[in-house]
Image: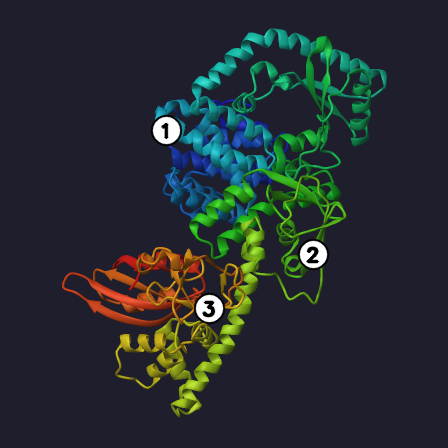
Amino acid sequence: MRKDNPKLTFDELYEKVCTYIKKDNERKLISSAYLFAFEKHFGQKRLSGEDYIVHPLNVAYILSEINADAATICAAILHDTIEDCDVTYEEITKKFGKEIADLVNGVTKINKLKFTCDNEAVIANHRKIIVGLSEDVRILIIKLADRLHNMRTLWILSEKSQKANAKETLDILTPIAHRLGMNQIKSELEDLSLRYYKPDVYFSIVEKLNQTRKERDLIVEKMMAGVSELLNQEGIKHEIKGRAKSIYSIYKKLDKGKKFSEIYDLLALRVFVNTEQECYQALGIIHSKYRPIPKRFKDYIAMPKTNMYQSLHTTVFGLEGYLFEIQIRTYEMDEVAERGIASHWSYKEKGSNVKASMQSAMEQKLQFFREIMELKEEETNDEEFVRSVQEDILKNTIYVFTPKGDVIELPQGSTPIDFAYRVHSGVGDTMVGALVNGNIVSLDYILNDSDIVKINTSKNSPGPSREWIDMAFTTQAKNKIRSFYNKIDKEEYAKQGNDLLQKEVRKRKIPFAEFFSNDNLAKLFDEYRVGDLNELHISIGSGRLSAIQVVNNFTNSSRSKEDILLDKVNAPEKKNISAKNDIIVRGVDEIKANIAACCKPIPGDEIVGYISKGHGINVHRTVCPNIIEGEERIIDVEWNDEIINKYSTDLLISADDSKDLLLNIISKSSGSDITIQSINNVSTSTRYLVTINVLVPNLERLEKFIHDLLMIPQVTNVERNIK
C-alpha cells in the first residue's frame, strides 16, 4: 500500500480512479467534489505545515487502492468539510446528493469523538461508530482510511498524543478492520500503532528482522523457485510471492512467550492460481515433495472465515530444514483477503451472479454490527453495553455449524442458548433441547470450534425459562429472553391493573362513563406520564402506581402526596409467613422454626438456630447481638435451596432533607420484586431518618434495593435495623 505522500495531487488521484471508474458522470462528480473541498479548505494548514487538502486527497487515494466506488471517493474528499469548514449537510446534499451527504455526515459524527480511557468515552465511541455503520458500512471504511493517513503522519504530534492515538487504534479500529476482512489496512494500522505505542519493542523487532533479512530473502527465493518448478511440471499456471510477516504479528507471538527464533512462519510464500480446484491440486503437489507439519493445515476455502477470507494454509519442512508457511488461493480470494468487505466493489461489473454473491456475503459480515445496534436499542446499562461489545463482538470467537453446514460465529463461552438466539429469536423462544455432534447436551453446555449444533423446537413450548438468562453467555441472548418475559409481564400487569382500577372505581361508586371519559383520561395520562390506558394499567399492575392513588386524582382528594404514597405502601395484604419448610434444621425433619423479630433474617443471610423453651427454634442472623449468650442452645440451620416466600426485614434510611424522599423511596421499589409494608418518619435535629419494613425474596435483591436507595441524591446512608 502506498505510503503518505505530502505532495499528492488531484491529477494523481484522478488518474488512479479512472483505471476502474469508467462512467463520465461519476468522474465529473469526483472532480466537482475536489474543487469544492479545495475551495472550502483553502488557507487551512495541517500541523505539519502542508495544505490541509493533502489529507482528504490521501484518504481518497487509500480508498482508490481498494477500488472504492465514486460516492465513497467523493465522501472521502469531502469528509472534513462539515467539521472544519462553514459547510452544512444540506449544502452537500444539494450539490452532491443525499448518498454522499450521508456518508460525510456519518464520518463527521465519528470524528467529533475524542477517545479517552474512561468508560463513558469508550461507550460513546462505540455507539457513534455503530450508529454510523448501521446507516452504511462505507462510513466506517472511510473512517479506517482517515485513521490510516493520520497514523502515517503521527510523528508531528507529542509523544503523549501519539500513544493515545495508537492505543485507541489498536483497541477500537483494528478489531473492526479485522471483522471487515480489510487485512491491508488492518496490518498497516497495527504496525504503525505499535511503532508509536511501544517504540522500543517495535524497533527491536525491526533490527532483528534486518539482521536476518539477507539470509531469509535468499532461502525464500530458492523455495519459490522449487515450488514453481513443481507446479510448472504439472501444468498449473500460477504466481508466487514471498510474504512478509507484519511486525505487529511478530510482536503478538513474542508477547505470548515465544522466542524470535521460534517464529517459524517468518518464512512464508503465497501461491496464486486461477481456480478453486487448482488450489487443492497445488496443495497436493507441494505436499508430495515437502513434508507438512501435522495440525498446521487449515482449509478456509471449504470453511471460510466469517469476514469472507478464503485460502489454504499449510506449514512444511522446506529447503535446508527451514519451516515455511504456504498460503494457496485464487486471485479473487486474494482480493477478498486483502480488501475484505470492500472487495465487493471490484466485482460490480463482473455479472449479476458474482455481484449478488458478494453482496450476500457482505450482508452476512454486517451481522455483528446489527447485533451491536440491537444491544444499543435494548434497555441495557452502560457497563452491560461495553461488556457486550468487548466480549460478545470484539474478543475470541468460535465457529459452529448448523446441520445444513451454515457457519455461525459466536464468542468463546457460548452455549446452545446463544446459538439458538443467534439463528433467530423464534428458534430460541421455542427451543426444547439441543444436540451437539449428534449427542444430547444440556443447555449450559459450552460449545467448541467446529461443533455441529441442532436445536429441537416445539410449537407447544411455553417459551424460554428465566433460568436461561444465567446459562446464556451473550448479552444478545440474555436480552431476548428478558424481552420475552417483559412482554408477558406487561400483559399480566395490564390485566391486573385493569381489574384493580375498575374495582376501585366501583368501590367509590364513580360512574365508569365519567372516570373513563376522554378528558379525565387525558388528565391522568399527563399526570402520570403514560401514553395510553394500557400503559396506565401496566403501571398499576406492576405497583408503580396504586389504583387508590389514580382514583384519588379524579376525586380531587385533599389528602397529601405522602398520605397517598403511604396508602400504596399499606395496600398490600400482609401475610404471616411460615418458615417451616424454608429452614432446614440439621438432623431434624419436623420442627417449628420462627424468624427472629430482632434481626429479621432473609434468604441469603448467614443464620443460626437458637433453641427456646416452648417456642421451638428461633432463627437469627449470625451477626445478631441477641445470640451472644447461651451458646449451648445454638444449632446449625440453613436455608432451603428453593424458597417461594418473601421475608420481612427493616431498613434505616438517613437523608439530608425530606423533599420528595418518600416518593423516591417508593419509586425505587417499583418493579424490583420488593414490597414496602410500612414507612415511619423519625426526624431529629440534625438528620432526617426513615424506617421502612420491606418484604424481599432474598439478600441479593435487598442489596440491589439498598444500592438503588443510595442513588437518591439526599440519601446519605442505608442500613439494616436490628432491634
Residue hosting label 2: 433
310 lies left or right of 663: right
Quick one: label 1, few (<14), some, or many (20+) residues within 10 Å?
Answer: some
**Is tag 2's residue or tag 1's residue first in the polypeptide sequence?**
1
Residue hosting label 1: 161
Query: Is residue 711 at least partly visible in the picture?
Result: no
Tell me the amino acid under the disc marked 2: Gly
Quick one: label 2, few (<14), some, or many (20+) residues within 10 Å?
Answer: some
> Which one is in front in this view, the residue at disc 3 or the one at disc 1?
3
Cα–Cα span, label 3 and label 2? 36 Å
Height in image: 195 above or below 672? above
The answer to which of 259 and 127 lies nearer the viewer is 259
Cα–Cα span, label 3 and label 1? 63 Å
> Which one is in front in this view, the residue at disc 2 or the one at disc 1?
2
Identify the residue at horizontal 77%, vertical 17% (top origin): 291
Height in image: 125 above or below 145? below
In the rendered view of the protein, which quadrant contains the N terminus?
top right
The answer to which of 216 and 682 lies nearer the viewer is 682
The quadrant where residue 342 appears = top right
* Extreme residue toward the left, this view: 685
Identify the residue at horizontal 48%, vertical 22% (top origin): 5
Q: Secondary structure at mark 1?
A: helix
The answer to which of 621 and 13 lies nearer the viewer is 621
**Is tag 3's residue or tag 2's residue first in the polypeptide sequence?**
2
In the rendered view of the protein, which quadrant contains the C terminus?
bottom left
Question: x, y (%) of residue 423?
Answer: 66, 52
Q: How many marks?
A: 3
Q: Which mark is residue 579?
A: 3
Tell me the amino acid under the disc marked 1: Ser
Question: x, y (%) of residue 216?
Answer: 63, 10
Query: Is residue 658 at least partly visible in the picture?
Result: yes
